[in-house]
Image: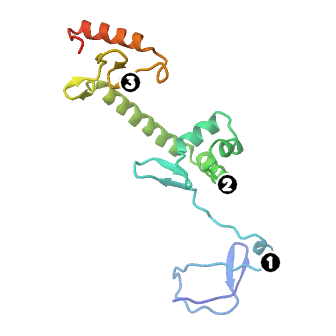
Amino acid sequence: MTIQIEAVYENGVFRPMRPVPLAEHQRVTVTLDAEGPAEALPLHADRPPLRVDEGGVVRVGRSRISLDLIVEHYENGMTPEDMVRAYDTLLLADVHAVIAYYLRRRDEVRAYLKRRQEEAESLRVKIEAEPARLAGGVADTPQCRGEGQCCDWPVTPMSTARSSAACAAACHRSTRARGIGSR
């Protein structure tokens, strides 16, 4: 049921201008349409411009910039204006809103950042513990394939800082050490 009621606000209490057809102690939702000075500036409760992407990372606005990065830059003294200049996908209002969110909820944000750090460290340890990746059953190490070509990468003075001779010599040392002959 929707009823529009005119009321006066006095000493923290709304006083209806006419009788209201409600039961005693009945709960209601009040929507205010104030007249006077309060009407000059409508106040809105905006949600922070944060979203969680498919990987569980909190991102700012429509950008790919993470909450982690904004907090890190803010803590290191970077201004919101500098952040927007550095990352052109950010909006200045979004950066200010995210910083305000962080300042109001430091403990929650820091707990999130700590979890992210722990996840990153766990992943790093896991990756470092894995054996070297194999290509075709042989470890991905250089094997000489003749003058001017080392491994799978063509070696020319124009394509690499190392010369063909230096690359071939390194491959020969590497393959001899493993007992592999030149092809």
Q: Is residue 127 left or right of residue 43?
A: left
Q: Secondary structure at mark 1?
A: loop
Q: Amino acid at mark 1?
A: Gly
Q: Which mark is residue 154?
A: 3
Residue 70: image quadrant is top right
- Residue at figure coordinates x 34%, y 15% from the top left: 147
Location of residue 75 with respect to 28 vertically, above or below: above
Asked if the residue at tag 2 contacts the one at tag 3, i.e. Cβ–Cβ closer than 8 Å, the answer is no
Count of all numbered marks drawn on residues in the image: 3
Nearest to the eye among marks 1 and 2: give it. Answer: 2
Q: Amino acid at mark 2?
A: Ala
* Residue 39, horizontal then vertical, whole percent: 76, 75
Q: Is residue 181 left or right of residue 107?
A: left
- Along the polypeptide, which appears first: circle 3 or circle 2? 2
- Residue at figure coordinates x 21%, y 29% from the top left: 136
Q: Secondary structure at mark 3?
A: strand
Of 139 and 162, the residue lying toward us: 162
Q: Is residue 119 left or right of residue 104?
A: left
Q: Estimate the spatial distance between the alpha carbons at disc 1 and disc 2, rounded to whole Å.
A: 29 Å
- Along the polypeptide, which appears first: circle 1 or circle 2? 1
* Residue 82, horizontal then vertical, whole percent: 70, 41
Mark 2, other Cα within 10 Å: few <14 / some 14–19 / many ≥20: some
Question: How is the rendered protein coloured?
Answer: rainbow
Q: Estimate the spatial distance between the alpha carbons at disc 3 and disc 2, rounded to whole Å.
A: 50 Å
Q: Which mark is residue 93?
A: 2
Q: Is residue 170 left or right of residue 136?
A: right
* Residue 133, horizontal then vertical, whole percent: 27, 27
Q: Which residue is mark 1?
A: 36
